[in-house]
Structures are given as structure tokens and as C-alpha cells.
Amino acid sequence: MREVFYAGSVPPKVGGLLEEAMSAYTDTARAEALLQQARHEAPEALPVYFSLYKFYFYKGRLADAEEAARSALKTAARQGGFPESYASLTPETADWTLHDSPQHFYLFSLKALAFIRLRQGDARGCEEILGKLRELDSADTVGGSVIGSLAAGL
């Protein structure tokens, strides 16, 4: 049996680690250790990367959140069979409309990276990422426009 999390399923052991990390959120060191153990156990599991970058972001550890988001992009690109560098991607590179796919997770993680860049005070870097996201996800399925609205308000 596989447990389902955002961005897919994970083996039961990894699901248990992710759930335990969520329960231990206030104990930062313990939660981080559990998340890193999950990453070690399932380095290709996209839900682990999602959990990592969200955890680091909410802990205010933006450099760690960025590293986790970039690792998520790299893993999703490898799984989807397309280049990891968003600058080289076009709407024709992959079918970006497929939900529950590495491509969709890539778009979602790209949105997360834009938000991280915004919180780091890099409005230009945020806008560059959002521009690519608008190009790849013209239907705004991952909600990049929300980050765009936040950026416009700053």
C-alpha cells in the first residue's frame, strides 16, 4: 500500500516519516531530521521535496527552501524527461496540462521558487520565473498569478 500526498504517492515508511515530521513541526531539529530521512529513503519521491521546501519556507530558512525547490525541479525534470533549466523550456517541451505528473509538479515547484525569490527580496528574479511560468502554464493551473499579485503589491 502506498500513501498519497501532494504530488503523488510514497512508500508507507516514507509516508510515516512525512506524517511524523508534520506532527513534530514545532521541534525543528526533529522534523528536519525526519524529512531528511524521508529524502534519503525515497530520493525520487516528489512529495518529499514538496514537504521539504514548504517546511524550510515556513521556518524562514529561505536558502534551504530554495535548495529544496531546485532539487524538486531537477527531480521532476528528470522524471518528466525534459531539461531542468526553466529558461530553456517552452510550451512545446512537454505536456504541461497533465495533472498528477512530473510536469505539473515542476510548474508548482517553479511557483514555489518564485515565491521564495520574492521573500528573499529578489523581485527581478521572481518576475523572471513568473514570466516563464505564465508562458508554460497559460491557464494558471498552479496559481502563479497569486504570487504575481503579491509581487505587484510590494
Image (cartoon, rainbow, N blue to C red):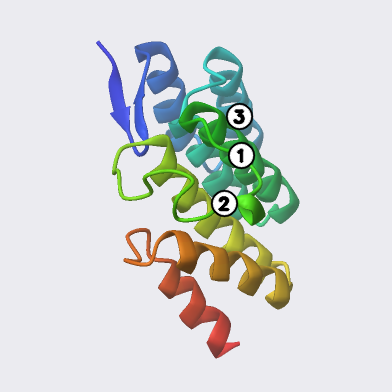
The structure residue drawn at horizontal position 70% and vertical position 55%, both measured from the top left corner, is 62
Rendering coords of residue 141 (x, y %): 32, 60
Circles 2 and 1, Cβ within 8 Å, touching? The answer is yes
The structure residue drawn at horizontal position 44% and vertical position 18%, both measured from the top left corner, is 14
Q: Pick out the residue farthest to the front.
A: 92
Rendering coords of residue 92 (x, y %): 45, 50
The structure residue drawn at horizontal position 64% and vertical position 41%, both measured from the top left corner, is 68
Judged by depth in the image, the label closer to the viewer, 1 or 3, is 1
- Residue type at numbered disc 1: Pro
Name the residue carrying label 1: 83
Name the residue carrying label 2: 89
Q: Residues within 10 Å of mark 2 (few under 14, many from 20)?
A: some
Quadrant position of residue 75 = top right
Front in this rendered view, residue 131 or 153: 131
Q: Which mark is residue 30?
A: 3
Secondary element type, mark 2: loop
